[in-house]
């Protein structure tokens, strides 16, 4: 959670100047891109090159070693055949630059990177066929198995014990529950947290650890049309939530966000699960906790979005995108219950795998 006033607020003219000064590029087009607490711009230079200028919020910018690991992880995935962005060096050869500027709240420092632009549209705009959901699960599992091989002197920065978006830290949501006062949703969230305490915490030592992307969501996965009239994944974006977690967390996060974009949310889990298990079959403890972990991610999304709105009321529409879609799905999953949802997911995953 970035602090209030941490989000940068550059003008287009500032972007043009920065791209010229840092990267020696003359911008012919600059367009703002949506973002949670950073600022992103689509930039085209006079020679037709396409880039994304990413300005990190001032809070996250205080941790250059973490940003360095995230930037390296993107390169490492790219080198290993996954479609991740890579950072372009500045004219002095650095992959990132700490820039001091005033965005209206006094002088602050913001970390700036210029990333390659990946073609495609967000998966939120594509029809989520079972095949595309399968590819999503498979890609997420491949990503985590590749990241597990990564070596870097600052790798320890990913042990982010207090990171509010880590699925290990569901219990810390209790401090934010007051933002749901008076809403029926609050009782559901409290119940999920209780389930997490009683069913996930005792089994967590059986989860296999890894490095998580941590935000494999419907706006961070890009797709392009493929030869068979379907879509293929063409990009994985935004490594700002990377942290040391568990394989099962990545799967739970992917299922939860794909449910948001599907007309029949409960049908999503099976295909994503089948794709995931084609790379990395779950162990018994992971299988048993998947339902509660998916619900836990819905709770994080809903509670933290409501909290962010109290900090940034002017950005309500963007902050509440996921939350508005997620609330009815969370209610639905909770009412159906663990046994019915898991039966649905695991049976359809088995059928899907049999057809492969």
Image: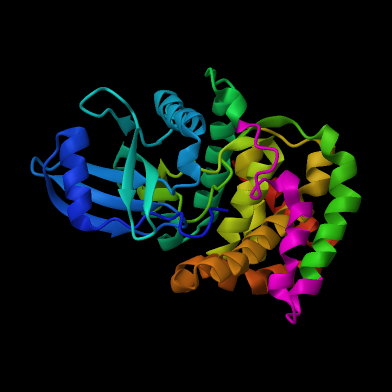
Residue 347 visible in image: no
Highlighted magenta segment, given as a residue range: 158-187
**Residue at 45% across, 69% down:** 315
265 lies left or right of 347: left
Does residue 92 show up magenta in the picture? Answer: no
Farthest-out residue, front = 106
Q: Residue furthest left?
A: 46
Where is residue 323 drawn, in percent x and y? 59, 68
How was this image coloured?
Answer: rainbow
Question: Observer-nearest residue: 102 or 76?
Answer: 102
Residue 256 quadrant? bottom right
What main secondary structure does the magenta stretch of the protein show?
A: helix
Residue under the point 74% across and 44% down:
168
Viewer-closest of 248 and 244: 244
Q: Is residue 337 left or right of residue 57?
A: right
Callout count: 0
């Amino acid at each position: 959670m970035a602090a209030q006033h941490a989000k940068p607020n550059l003008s287009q003219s500032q972007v043009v100047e920065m791209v010229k000064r840092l990267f020696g590029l003359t911008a012919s087009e600059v367009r703002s891109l949506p973002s949670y607490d950073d600022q992103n711009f689509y930039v085209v230079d006079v020679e037709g090159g396409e880039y994304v200028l990413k300005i990190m919020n001032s809070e996250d910018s205080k941790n250059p070693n973490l940003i360095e690991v995230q930037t390296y992880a993107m390169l490492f995935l790219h080198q290993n055949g996954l479609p991740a962005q890579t950072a372009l060096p500045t004219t002095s050869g650095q992959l990132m630059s700490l820039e001091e500027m005033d965005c209206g709240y006094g002088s602050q420092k913001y970390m700036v990177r210029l990333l390659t632009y990946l073609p495609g549209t967000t998966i939120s705009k594509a029809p989520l066929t079972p095949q595309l959901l399968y590819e999503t699960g498979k890609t997420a599992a491949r990503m985590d198995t590749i990241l597990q091989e990564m070596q870097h002197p600052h790798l320890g920065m990913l042990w982010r014990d207090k990171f509010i978006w880590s699925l290990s830290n569901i219990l810390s949501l209790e401090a934010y529950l007051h933002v749901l006062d008076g809403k029926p949703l609050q009782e559901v969230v409290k119940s999920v947290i209780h389930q997490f305490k009683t069913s996930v915490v005792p089994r967590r030592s059986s989860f296999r650890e890894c490095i998580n992307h941590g935000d494999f969501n419907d706006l961070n996965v890009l797709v392009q049309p493929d030869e068979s009239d379907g879509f293929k994944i063409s990009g994985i974006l935004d490594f700002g939530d990377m942290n040391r977690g568990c394989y099962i967390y990545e799967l739970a996060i992917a299922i939860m966000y794909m449910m948001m974009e599907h007309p029949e949310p409960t049908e999503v889990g099976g295909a994503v699960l089948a794709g995931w298990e084609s790379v990395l079959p779950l162990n018994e403890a992971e299988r048993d906790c998947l339902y509660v972990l998916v619900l836990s991610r819905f709770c994080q999304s809903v509670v933290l979005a409501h909290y962010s709105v109290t900090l940034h009321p002017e950005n309500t529409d963007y902050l509440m995108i996921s939350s508005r879609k997620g609330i009815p799905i969370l209610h639905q999953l909770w009412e159906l219950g663990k046994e019915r949802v898991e039966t649905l997911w695991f049976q359809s995953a088995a059928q899907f795998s049999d057809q492969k």
